[in-house]
Image (cartoon, grey):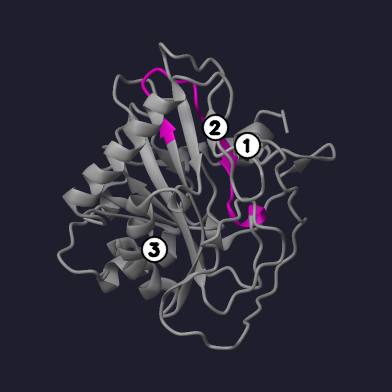
Amino acid sequence: MTGIYQLYQERISMKALTQEQVDTFWRDGVLVVEGAVDSVDLQRMRDEFAHWVEESRSHLNDFGECQDGRPRFDLQPGHSAEKPALRRVQSPEEISDVFADVMRTANTVDFCAQLVGPAIRFHHGKVNSKLPGSATQIKWHQDFPFQPMTNDDMITCLLFVDEVTLENGPLEVLPGTHKGELHTHWHDGVFTGAVDESIVEASADKIVKCTGPAGSVCLMHARLLHGSAPNLSSNPRTLYITTYYSEDAIELSPNHLPSELTHELVRGEPSGRVRCVPYDMELPAVPKATSFFAQQEGAD
């Protein structure tokens, strides 16, 4: 069944999902929708990221500073001026009006409000990039164990700044796993940021890959099992990733990517209420290095 997730790629003309798309999201925990951002904002994001890549050429190590003191710009091991490998920009909304605008106004936000709203808040944002020939890969994990809340109405949105193909390291998912257990990301007393490989191997025939044209968004439930492989192509694969959550959820552990915009109400009105759902899991370890890439590499 491994293949392109074309079943969920449907072009829309309004800032609303069809009932079929809504049903698909809740059935599978994932939905790819085209036209999540207009061409002007798409180009503005590309230009901004290209500027950051150029800036990275003058650095040998991670650089910049986030609100919690960790570096903002995360460089893949092997990065050089000749072959830059900027793999993540933490909280780009804090330093870029372009990304702050998209975080607040893209169709993505309306889709999330329709699914887990009507009132939703911004949790965190980052740019993840796999430049051509980079070794960046992401081990299988669930997002919710990194960011537990009182309820799990939480969506990770992967906005395709570049076209995402089978060759340039697309998101890989196991549909329906958002309805299953929250797997441990701790192994031998270390928070590795990944699930045991045997969990994925047992369902390898059910893995699907999420591809689509630039400007699409992959809406992914925070409990869904997912990962991605290295970029084997000559084309970049850059994503702007934002996470939104239902306004009536309260954070239960320190935010791994705190920002001055964290918890901003982006749709709806405050309810003055908190909603709780039952679940059981270990608390995550807050990363000390630049990003969770170090946790997955065992370097944090």
Question: Which residue is found at the position 65% from the left and 32% from the top?
Answer: 294
The reply to whether residue 228 is in sight is no
- In the image shown, does 8 or 171 lie closer to the viewer? 171
Secondary structure of residue under mark 3: helix
281 with respect to 128 (left or right): right
Please indicate, yes or no, whether residue 64 appears anywhere in the rendered image. yes
Residue 142 painted magenta? yes
Spot the residue most to the right: 189
Residue 133 colored in magenta in the image: yes
Of the numbered discs in the image, which one, if any, rests on residue 74? Answer: 2
**Given the image, on which type of amino acid does mark 3 rest?**
Phe
Q: Does 284 appear above or below 238?
A: below
Q: Position of residue 5 (x, y in %)?
A: 32, 46
Structural crowding at the residue carrying mark 3, measured as other residues with C-alpha within 10 Å and reported as few (<14), some (14–19) or many (≥20): many
Give the image location of residue 245, x and y in percent.
Answer: 51, 68
Percent coordinates x, y for residue 102 in the rendering: 33, 57
User: In the rendered structure, which amino acid carries the disc numbered 2?
Assistant: Asp
Q: Count the labels in the image.
A: 3
66 or 286, which lies in front? 66
| Residue for badge 3 | 25
Q: Which residue is mark 1?
A: 290
CB contact under 8 Å: marks 3 and 1: no
- Give the residues drawn in magenta, as a range: 129-146
Residue sitting at x 53%, y 88%: 271
Q: Is residue 112 above or below residue 275?
A: above
Gap between marks 3 and 2 measured at Cα: 31 Å
Quadrant location of the N terminus? top left
SS under mark 1 = loop
